[in-house]
Image (cartoon, rainbow, N blue to C red):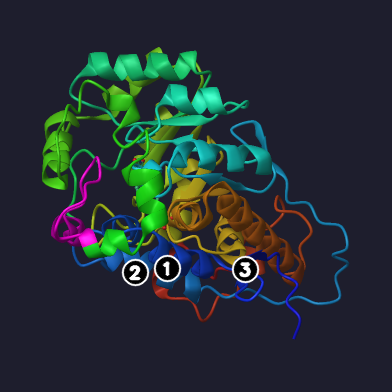
């Protein structure tokens, strides 16, 4: 059967690789970059219960298949924080993106810009705010971790202002770091190093080694002069625990609000009560997130709490969603539960590692096409009108139910 999904065909004429899913990107990434970096993206904290729940709860949700509806005219464009977005999607902040591909953050930002969705740069990026600003022509978002050194935070906020970032995303769910056991075992270091232990692995990824290991940007671009010449993830973990502020409270968000003149996004809300607090700060948006299953292991999946958070917010700010998004179908499910838009972390990194900027562009096209087709087959024409009516109530785990045990439909 012919495949009409947007595909990316690469390779020599004798061995053409057809890429038409995020899973394909993941597989190519696995073969392209060192194991320590691949697993840094792939794995979650502790027993990875929450990491798995993010996926399994999304997968368990069923659509209602609707027929005989005119779906010849569809609209997937929207706005996120008032900015036009080609589809309801943004690229999530991911630390160390520049180790997945040389100049990773620049390439990711450019791909997002060309496609027409927001890109969010992490505090812990390899390319600096200024690097990304110089390489792009549209404003991007900047993600901020709150550190003990408030003067440094004030400096980062000012740099984001100078770079004309259009939104500041403050991450709330990492006052301390949870352990990802694989990272400790893999000995991931920043900057990456060739060691006796990883020599074979790195030798089998010569393209990555040439571009990244011997490339120009290999350490934290935004932290120059602060991260020093610390080596090894143990040292990075130590730096984070020394630098990130475990005492942050809602008062600190007010501190940020008073210094940041633009749109404010609070990331890491997973509870209705916290959603009330977040709205009270005057935030423009929240991100329902459990850090992609990388922080509190045993926390619920993001999709299972999305309905109660949306209800708690009651339209006071935009509700964005991340955690486990790997397809256009996943995006549609989050929209059905009331998310304004979604963010992708791992899916973006796989595409970046696999093929750089064209890889990210290709992944975005795949997601858009899957969203378009799924929208049509649920009998919908516009991403703004989808709601819980497009979902079936049964066949879903209880955790994904609506509060009070009501049906998902209606
Ligand atoms: C490798 C990696 C690095 C991340 N780094 C950051 C970060 O620096 N700041 C942040 O707020 N979130 C970070 N996150 C979390 C993402 O922003 C996002 O919440 C998560 O990846 C969404 O889940 P998904 O990966 O299943 O799409 C990171 C996630 C990954 C996978």
In-image side of 79 versus 319 (left or right):
right
Residue 19 appears in which quarter of the rendering?
Answer: bottom right
Q: Residue at x 59, y 57 (%)?
A: 363
Question: x and y percent of residue 327 in the render?
Answer: 57, 64
Label 3, residues with CA under 10 Å away: few <14, some 14-19, many ≥20: few
Q: Secondary structure at mark 2?
A: helix
Name the residue located 55 percent from the left edge and 64 percent from the top edge: 330
Calculate the distance from the C-alpha at mark 3 to the C-alpha at mark 1.
34 Å
Question: In this picture, is 87 found above or below 217?
Answer: below
> In the image, is residue 111 above or below residue 329?
above
Question: Image check: 123 left or right of 379?
Answer: left
The CB of the residue at mark 2 lies under 8 Å from ligand 1: no
Q: Position of residue 403 (x, y in %)?
A: 44, 61
| Badge number at residue 1 | none
For the question of whether residue 269 can be seen, the reply is no
Q: Name the image quarter holding the C terminus.
A: bottom right
Pick whichever of labels 3 and 1 is earlier in the sequence: 3
**1 and 2 marks in contact (CB < 8 Å):** yes
Estimate the x, y position of residue 93 in percent, counting from the top left. Answer: 42, 41
Q: Is residue 287 visible?
A: yes
Among all residues in the image, which is located at the extreme bottom? 1
Q: Secondary structure at mark 1?
A: helix
According to the picture, the residue beneath numbered tag 1 turns out to be 55
Residue segment shown in magenta: 180-199
Magenta run includes residue 396: no
Q: Where is mark 3, residue-wise? A: 12
In the rendered structure, does residue 192 fall within the stretch colored magenta?
yes
Q: Assess mark 1: CB under 8 A from ligand 1?
A: yes
In terms of sequence position, does the residue under pointer 2 or pointer 3 come before the other? 3
| Closer to us: 374 or 186 | 186
């Amino acid at each position: 059967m012919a495949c009409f999904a947007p595909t990316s065909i690469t390779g020599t004429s004798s061995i053409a690789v057809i890429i038409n899913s995020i899973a394909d990107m993941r597989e190519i990434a696995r073969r392209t970059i060192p194991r320590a970096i691949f697993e840094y993206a792939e794995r979650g904290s502790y027993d990875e219960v929450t990491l798995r729940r993010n996926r399994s709860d999304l997968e368990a949700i069923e659509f209602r298949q609707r027929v005989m509806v005119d779906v010849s005219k569809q609209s997937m464009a929207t706005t996120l924080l008032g900015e036009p977005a080609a589809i309801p999607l943004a690229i999530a902040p991911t630390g160390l993106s520049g180790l997945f591909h040389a100049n990773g953050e620049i390439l990711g930002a450019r791909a997002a810009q060309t496609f027409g969705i927001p890109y969010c740069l992490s505090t812990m990026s390899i390319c600096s705010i200024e690097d990304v600003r110089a390489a792009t022509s549209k404003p991007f978002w900047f993600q901020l971790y709150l550190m003990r050194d408030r003067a440094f935070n004030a400096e980062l906020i000012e740099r984001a202002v100078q770079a004309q970032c259009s939104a500041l995303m403050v991450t709330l769910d990492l006052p301390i770091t949870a352990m990802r056991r694989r990272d400790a075992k893999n000995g991931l270091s920043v900057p990456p190093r060739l060691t006796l232990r990883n020599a074979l692995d790195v030798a089998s990824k010569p393209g990555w080694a040439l571009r990244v290991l011997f490339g120009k940007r290999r350490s934290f671009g935004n932290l120059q002069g602060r991260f020093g010449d610390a080596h090894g993830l143990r040292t990075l973990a130590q730096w984070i625990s020394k630098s990130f502020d475990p005492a942050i409270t809602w008062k600190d968000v007010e501190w940020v609000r008073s210094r940041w003149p633009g749109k404010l996004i609070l990331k890491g809300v997973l509870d209705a009560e916290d959603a009330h607090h977040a709205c009270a700060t005057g935030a423009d948006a929240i991100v329902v997130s459990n850090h992609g299953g990388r922080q509190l292991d045993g926390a619920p999946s993001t999709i299972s709490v999305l309905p109660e958070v949306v209800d708690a917010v009651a339209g006071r700010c935009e509700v964005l969603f991340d955690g486990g998004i790997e397809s256009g179908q996943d995006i549609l499910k989050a929209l059905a539960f009331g998310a304004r838009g979604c963010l992708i972390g791992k899916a973006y990194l796989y595409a970046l590692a696999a093929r750089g900027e064209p890889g990210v562009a290709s992944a975005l096209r795949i997601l858009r096409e899957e969203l378009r087709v799924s929208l049509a087959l649920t009998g919908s024409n516009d991403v703004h009108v989808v709601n819980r009516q497009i979902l079936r109530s049964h066949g879903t785990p209880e955790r994904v139910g609506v509060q009070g045990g009501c049906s998902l439909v209606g």
